[in-house]
Image: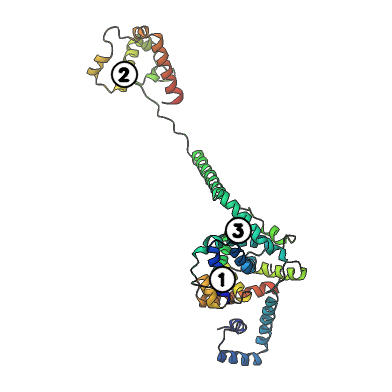
Amino acid sequence: MNTNNKIVEYLDGQLSQEEKDSFENELKSSPGLQSEFQQYKKFKESLTQLRNIEVDESYFIETIPKFRTRQSVLKRYGVVPKLTLSLSTLLAVALVFVLIFFRSNKVAIPNKVVVVDSNGVDFSTLLDPSSDNFNLNYISSNEASHYDSLLNSMITKALDLSPDELSYVAPSNNSDLTSLLQNINEKEADNIYNEVLKQKILGR
Amino acid sequence: MTDTDNDFELINSFISGNQAAFNKIVLKYQQKIYWHARRMTGNHLDADEVVQEVLIVLYNKLKDFQFKSSLYTWIYKITATRSINYLKKRNLRQIFSFDDLEAKSVSSSEDVIKDLETKEKLDSLEKALQKVPLRQREVFIMRNFDEMSYEEISEITGVTTGGLKANYFHAMKKIMEIMQNNEY
């Protein structure tokens, strides 16, 4: 046991009579220990002076009325104010997390739909002047048949049909795009237009 | 009539619906509650907040008191727990800068101690106490100011007497050093 600890225990009344006698003998023969002991003793006495402090009694007179007021507020509102505060804090934290999450993730862009004609050529490249597939003569001479093949390909894909089944759906005679467009009435054209807008703008 | 008998009657009277009995219990123990909270928190405003929290717990739980310990020990246990919980919350508020401890400690107009010399001495002690860990501070206060035995402190804190003695020794040494060297 070190000397500091012994001094504290002595002043704290924790030593047995035997230990106490031994410590007091040691204290008499050691000036260094005496000096240290006096420091602790003085400090301990200063603490005793702070044990019973005179206070303004009016504070303690107010304690009960203050408690009763707080109690009536709690009875009226229960845990609602605290709960509301906790919930709003929780929501604010959740909002911050959501914002951080979405800022760190790019908005997913739907894959580009590639439509091919009967020869397997991407239709968009046929109309793109910068593309190797671009051929003005090819387009003009085969325009109608390619549009027809595009239309059939779209119908086949949308309805998941085999080529045989397609013949039941697609018109066999006058099946070119021009005649098809001519047969569309105003209401159907509006529906198609609205559907295209939905697909393009809203992506659904 | 002994003090314990008196507490027993007050509690039973309160359970029967006598609100005045609760007031009497508060009047009897409020200074003990206040001073423990004050020494633990280091300022009057926080101590006042802890006192109010303790009274609310006391009011709600008094009907469940089973006389397994004295009422004083039970109230002291509530006060010690509430003080530590309050300090943990205060530390969190300080981390997020919602709480200005300096402003609280220098605000003397709201203090209950009117004698300036005593207040200065108490300020030094309170600042030194804030520099030691909670458990060391707690045992230092209970031992020095409330003159509790280690057995009583152990009953309140749940720490073994050996652990308490070690905490007390470290607290005593550190607080004395801080106060002698004015290391606030």
CA–CA distance in space, label 3 to label 2 = 69 Å
Residue at position x 28%, y 13% from top?
A: A170
Residue under label 2, please give it: A155
Above or below residue B166? Residue A135 is: above
What is the chain letter for disc 3?
B
Q: Nearer the viewer, mark 3 or mark 2?
A: 3
> Do labels 2 and 1 touch, CB within 8 Å?
no
Res. A95 mark: none
Asked where in the image residue A34 lies, by quadrant, the reply is bottom right
Q: Amino acid at mark 1?
A: Asp
Q: Secondary structure at mark 3?
A: helix
Res. B90 mark: 3
Around disc 3, counting alpha carbons within 10 Å, would you say few (fewer than 14), some (14 to 19), or many (20 or more)? Answer: some
CA–CA distance in space, label 1 to label 3 = 33 Å
| Residue A111 position within the rendered picture, expressed as x and y whole percent measured from the top left | 40, 29
| Residue B65 position within the rendered picture, expressed as x and y whole percent measured from the top left | 50, 66
Which one is in front, A38 or B123? Answer: B123
Q: Amino acid at mark 2?
A: Ile
Res. B7 mark: 1
In the rendered view of the protein, which quadrant contains the C terminus of chain B? bottom right
Q: Nearer the viewer, mark 2 or mark 1?
A: 1
